Image (cartoon, helix red, strand yellow):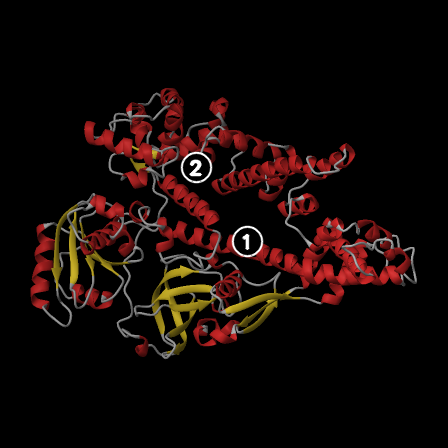
Amino acid sequence: MQDIYIKEIASRIGARNWQVENCIELIEEGATVPFISRYRKEKTGALDEVQVAEIKHLHGKFSDLDERKAFILKSVSEHEGMTPEKLAEITEKVSSLLDPQELEDIYLPYRPRRRTRASAARECGLEPLADEILTFRYSRDLAPVASRFLNEKVVDMESALSGARDIIAERISEMQEVRAALRSSYGRFGMLHSKVVKSRIEEADKYSNYFDYREPVGRIASHRLLAVLRGDSEGLLSVKIDIDAEKSEESIIRVFNSGKRLPQGACGDQVRLAVDDAYRRLLHPSIENEVIRAAKEKADIESIRVFGENLRQLLLAPPVGQKRTLAIDPGFRTGCKVVCLDAQGALLHNDTIYPHPPQNEKVNAMKKISNLVESYRIEVIAIGNGTASRETEAFIRKIALPEGVKVYSVSEDGASVYSASPVAREEFPDYDVTVRGAVSIGRRLMDPLAELVKIDPKSLGIGQYQHDVDQAMLKEKLDEVVELAVNSVGVNLNTASKHLLSYVSGIGPALAQNIVDYRTENGAFSSRQQLLSVKRLGAKAFEQSAGFLRVPGGENPLDNSAVHPESYELVKRIAADLNMKLADLISNQEALSGIDPAKYASEGEYTVKDIINELAKPGRDPRSTIKVFEFSSEIHALEDVKCGMKLPGIVTNITNFGAFVDVGIKENGLIHVSNMASGRHVSDLSKYVRLHQHIMVEVLNVDVQRKRLQLRLVSD
């Protein structure tokens, strides 16, 4: 990659050129982001996964830009009348560009185009007249000059001058400097203005805040811009940019005429008319679209960032672990679907109970639950947080459960999507969607990460206008988040599903299936080295994946740690130097604290320190410990909520404008950013709340008619 791009990437992420260059070299060799950030710290200077991921993203963008540059230069070189000198000048300009829009500005005059008013005027032989006008030599009467260009296609003076103005207007509209100046001006001073489409006002109630709304386009919040643009795409709102046209035209004149005013007289008058036409017909519509598109891209990036952070928090939510689980998908009329799972998440039993109206079979339901808990030695109970959740939880807590059995409320978001998916049908072909949904609820309590990777993140209820943003950019970000989450935790090679395995560094769906097939045919893996016996899993895939795969109880204790096989010999040497067996070194804090990393400096300072840390706590899970949560017993519906109440709640979604909180009723409440920290407006909500966090809130306002609940975060 060219130095110009490397320098720009380094500047953006706050790294040195050599770090970026080495990282790109690894990426081009096929290394993954988790592998580079975890096992190639010496080469990258310990760039973290966020920096490596950004380098990968920018490497892709600049590679695309380079391809576009090559295409444009080839196209320009074939343009009629292109001279070697002019081509060399354009090539020099293009080679130093980092902004795709500036590149397109340079290409604009040479781009193949459909027939325009200016091209029609050129065909009539009026280009020399346009050149004459731009000399400004004629201060009084242009008739003698214009008369020389009359012909069968140009029948009078006004037609000749009009055609010449069309040519001048197009030249002005294609000037890179003019477009750059206007683009900057629109970004600084333009006001985004949305208005309701009057003929559809009755359908547009949800956009009532934007029926006649103005905000500087350069400062509009991402969620407001995306809302306005969604209304526009639905034909309910019209969106434009308001800006002072007179000042814009003055700016065009200054740039076009090298900072000078236009001379008075006939030529100046014609050019002013051409400037006005260029601005209103050609420049304003084009720049308006560009600026809105740029604002949309900025909003997309911010919205996707929020979505990505929410997804990361959701995937890394605390697991209850491998415990025998009874899971309930609550319901009223259709009953509560109950499943029992073993400690590995396998389905052992399913049933249905009807403890709620209209059946009200409470006694029978209690007997069933008690028998199931005893028969399957249940350790935890998971209850979906949808319809009838509070009632079901209250019912379960009335049962005399064995000591130590804990009850958890589990988010149902995406469970219905999973239950009807090909993945669920493949896992449970003989069961209906209700059973599959209950299994998903239980499994996501046991291990949220392992279960949620099976579900499209857009179905998890944690996004912000996720269907309106750039879908390719969104997919890239979400795939990156899932990959980093899976590899930060590590994956049990003998129990992981193919869906979880597919996100392991260097694996992918095809190799994941091959690993599962090998496991089925040959039994559990006893070592990481056995991976090389899996069909089509070669040395490169082994290098990228082995450190993130765990083999509990395997032949080599290091196979259940994050120590990479390439470092096994180093660990053996460290153990030998300490006169210890390898197994005795693991988790031996006293021995590990006495190791001098400098003694093994040739292996890399970062590598040795990481190995020592890993040996101290092998296979440690970065996720926190799960906690039992209970809603307030005072409220069951919005009508029960009163201003001033302080209630426990669970954060269900985080956006740029605030956090949504479940306080145990159907409607989620909103903590606006202005109510997050003692009345102060905050920009980074992650400092105050995280997804699925248990918090206390104070009720500020209850609107029963509009089903809205305003909350304030209460400090611990």
Looking at the rendered image, the quarter that the C terminus falls into is bottom left
How far apart, in angstroms, are the residues tagged by discs 2 and 1? 27 Å
For label 2, the SS is: helix
State left or right for residue 148 relative to residue 49: right
For label 1, the SS is: helix
Is 2 above or below relative to 198? Answer: above
The one of 241 and 123 positioned closer to us in this rendering = 123
Residue 705 visible from this viewpoint: yes
Q: Are marks 2 and 1 in contact (CB under 8 Å)?
A: no
Q: How many marks?
A: 2
Looking at the rendered image, the quarter that the N terminus falls into is top right
Residue 587 visible from this viewpoint: no
User: For residue 280, what is the image quadrant?
Assistant: bottom right
Q: Amino acid at mark 1?
A: Glu
State left or right for residue 33 relative to residue 667: right
Which x, y percent locates residue 617? 35, 37
Q: Amino acid at mark 2?
A: Pro
Which x, y percent locates residue 583? 29, 27
**Residue at which label 1 appears:** 297
Which x, y percent locates residue 305? 48, 52
Which x, y percent locates residue 214? 59, 70
**Residue at which label 2 appears:** 34
Outermost residue toward the front in this view: 152
First-in-chain label (2 vs 1): 2
Residue 624 image label: none
Residue at 88% over, 62% down: 266
Is 334 above or below relative to 516? Answer: below
